[in-house]
Amino acid sequence: MAEGLIFVRSVKRRDIRRRDMLHFGIIGLGNIAHRFADSLSHFEEADFYAGASYTESKREEFKKKYKPHIIYDNYEDLLNDQEVDVVYICVPHSLHYKWCKEALLHDKCVLVEKPAVLKVNEFDELTALSRERHLFFMEAMKTRFLPLLKIVHKEINKGLIGDIISISNHFCFYLENHRKDHYLFDKEQGGCLYDTGCYGLASVCDFIKDDVISIKNDATYCDGIDVHDRITLTFRHGQKAFIECAMDSADNRKMIIKGTKGDIIMDPYYRPMEAVFNLKDGESQTCTVEYDYDDFHGEIEAVLQSIAYLRIEHENYTHQDNRRVIELMERIKESL
């Protein structure tokens, strides 16, 4: 990020504060919050200022490991802290809407873990608040901000593999030693579509912008939640996409983009550092691009850049892009 950027944002809509660092607050101090806090520590333009958890052991762990300015024992106090500029929300899926809305109403910019919400109408309400209060709001779909993806898009746009015919991606794993009271096994918010299927949908929508005219899902259920989804999308102009996500299957995390002149393989597709281009003339090329520190870095950089330039969304993953993914998740759920 360019040196010397000054962050300007509205606080309580009347007070304007200028400084060269943004203070992040983290709501929900689980496993992914550790990875986010670690990545954030490598930025000079932002810091981990405040955290919040209802669990004492998590508060103590984060306090000792990351040394934020303050750790709260409830989310409300963090939102009332006027020093917090941006809130990273990583609580169970069904709580995203509530705490995103509360954060925006407290004039905080928001980065929320995927899926941002579970319903399109909830997303529309949050983006309306974002526009009304001119606050940045984005789902944490880090796949849109990985360095390798820029090159893959560039080569596709140059016509290296011709026109895209189909895309298949897989995010399969065994979920072992799980607790039945874990939110992933809650009928309202659980299942692999919400957990990892959203990565597959977002990746497909990144490369095929056409309307989806047909959805089929061959799903396997356990105790009322989907543990294995096999989703086929048909697009208006004939392209196909196959998305497999599973919590009961051997590891498979590959994506293949097939074109009229060749294909592209990335593995794992949701945080790749290598892409293999196989062309129909027999030529094969491998492109390797390492992360800028880790797979969270590009996402955080996008947040900082957007806020610095007073944007409420980022061009790599706009509100409309995100809405399309949530709408598809709703349609898939309704098709079952």
Image (tube, grey):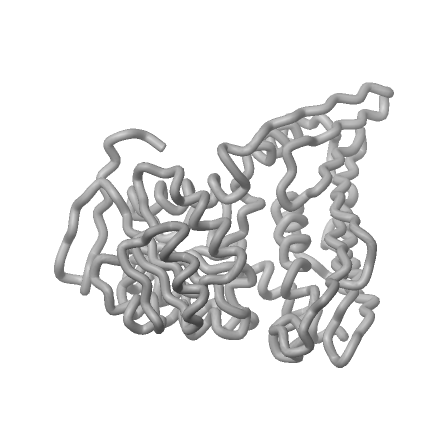
Q: Which residue is painted at 74% across and 49% down in the image?
A: 237
Residue 94: tell me if it is visible: yes
Residue 57: name its quadrant: bottom left
Q: Position of residue 251 (x, y in %)?
A: 79, 50
Q: Which residue is painted at 44% across and 55% down in the image?
A: 138
Answer above or below: position of 259 versus 220. above
Q: Nearer the viewer, residue 125 or 290?
A: 290
Left/right placement of residue 26 relative to residue 197 reads left
Residue 110: tell me if it is visible: no
Left/right placement of residue 233 relative to residue 289 reads right
Q: Which residue is painted at 53% across and 74% down in the image?
A: 94
Left/right placement of residue 285 relative to residue 314 reads right
Left/right placement of residue 246 relative to residue 45 reads right
Count of numbered badges drawn on the protein: 0
Answer above or below: position of 222 versus 206. below
Q: Nearer the viewer, residue 104 or 297?
A: 297
